[in-house]
Image (spheres, rainbow, N blue to C red):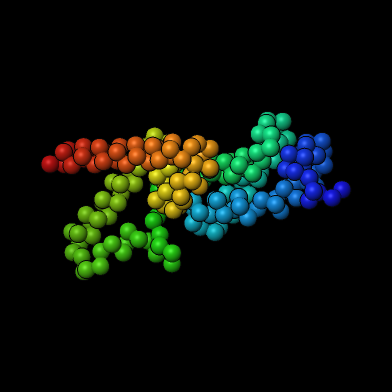
């Protein structure tokens, strides 16, 4: 059977009817986009590969259990699974990703160009710890958009596509996330005086 001429929907039907070899074609078609969407969020090759493999295990298990019902939307469905696994990973690790520049350097460490005192360094490190803790306290939808925008450097269009919402909803979630972070910082300022 020539698989290239069939749609994803056809291949899923073939797979559900016992033709397991079609999974290779689905993987071949979409591996790059799925892996890239995961890598952009985690910025770590090995972690991205692990989450990519977990994603396909989940896809296979969902298909086999008969719970797949995203007719005609195979790729967005798989990307969403990968995206959810990334968010689960960050939740489990209880940390936000490190903000890195194109060459892989932690940007937070580059902010201080001058020779900082021990007190300045401790204050800066505590500020980063506080900010990461505040991000963890945001509602999941807001945290998700903030992480994808500022840590994974995705556009609002990409975020909207990955989270299956409108661009305006993604923008709104970001606005609320930043507003909530400001409020948490103000409360922290007041409580530390």
Question: In x, y percent, where is residue 127?
Answer: 26, 50
Q: Is residue 85 placed above or below 69 in the rendered structure?
A: below
Q: Quadrant of residue 170?
A: top left
Question: In x, y percent, where is residue 24?
Answer: 75, 50
Camera-side residue: 3 or 97?
3
Q: In the drawing, does residue 8 fall left or right of residue 104?
A: right
Question: In x, y percent, where is residue 40?
Answer: 50, 54
Camera-side residue: 72 or 46?
72
The answer to whether any part of residue 137 appears in the image is no
Q: Quadrant of residue 64?
A: top right
Q: Looking at the image, how many numbered discs can be counted on the residues?
A: 0
- Residue occupying the point 51% across, 57% down: 44
Q: In the drawing, does residue 150 fall left or right of residue 26?
A: left
- Residue occupying the point 73% across, 39% down: 9
Q: Is residue 12 placed above or below 26 in the rendered structure?
A: above
Question: In x, y percent, where is residue 11?
Answer: 77, 42
Camera-side residue: 134 or 157?
157
The answer to whether any part of residue 26 appears in the image is yes
Q: Is residue 172 placed above or below 35 in the rendered structure?
A: above
Q: Name, please, the residue furthest toward the right.
A: 1
Q: Name, please, the residue furthest toward the left.
A: 193
| Quadrant of the frame with the C terminus | top left
Q: In the drawing, does residue 29 fall left or right of residue 176?
A: right
- Residue occupying the point 66% across, 40% down: 74
- Residue occupying the point 21% across, 39% down: 186
């Amino acid at each position: 059977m020539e698989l290239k001429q069939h749609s994803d929907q056809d291949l899923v039907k073939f797979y559900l009817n016992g033709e397991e070899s079609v999974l290779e074609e689905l993987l071949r078609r979409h591996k790059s986009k799925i892996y890239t969407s995961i890598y952009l969020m985690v910025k770590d090759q090995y972690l991205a590969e692990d989450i990519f493999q977990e994603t396909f295990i989940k896809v296979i298990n969902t298909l086999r259990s008969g719970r797949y019902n995203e007719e005609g939307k195979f790729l967005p469905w798989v990307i969403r699974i990968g995206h959810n696994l990334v968010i689960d990973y960050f939740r489990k690790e209880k940390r936000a990703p490190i903000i890195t520049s194109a060459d892989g350097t932690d940007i937070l460490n580059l902010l201080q160009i001058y020779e900082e005192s021990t007190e300045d360094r401790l204050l800066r490190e505590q500020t980063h710890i506080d900010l990461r803790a505040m991000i963890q306290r945001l509602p999941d939808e807001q945290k998700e958009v903030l992480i994808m925008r500022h840590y994974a450097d995705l556009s609002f269009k990409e975020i909207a596509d990955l989270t299956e919402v409108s661009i305006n909803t993604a923008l709104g979630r970001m606005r609320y996330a930043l507003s909530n972070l400001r409020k948490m910082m103000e409360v922290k300022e007041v409580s530390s005086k």
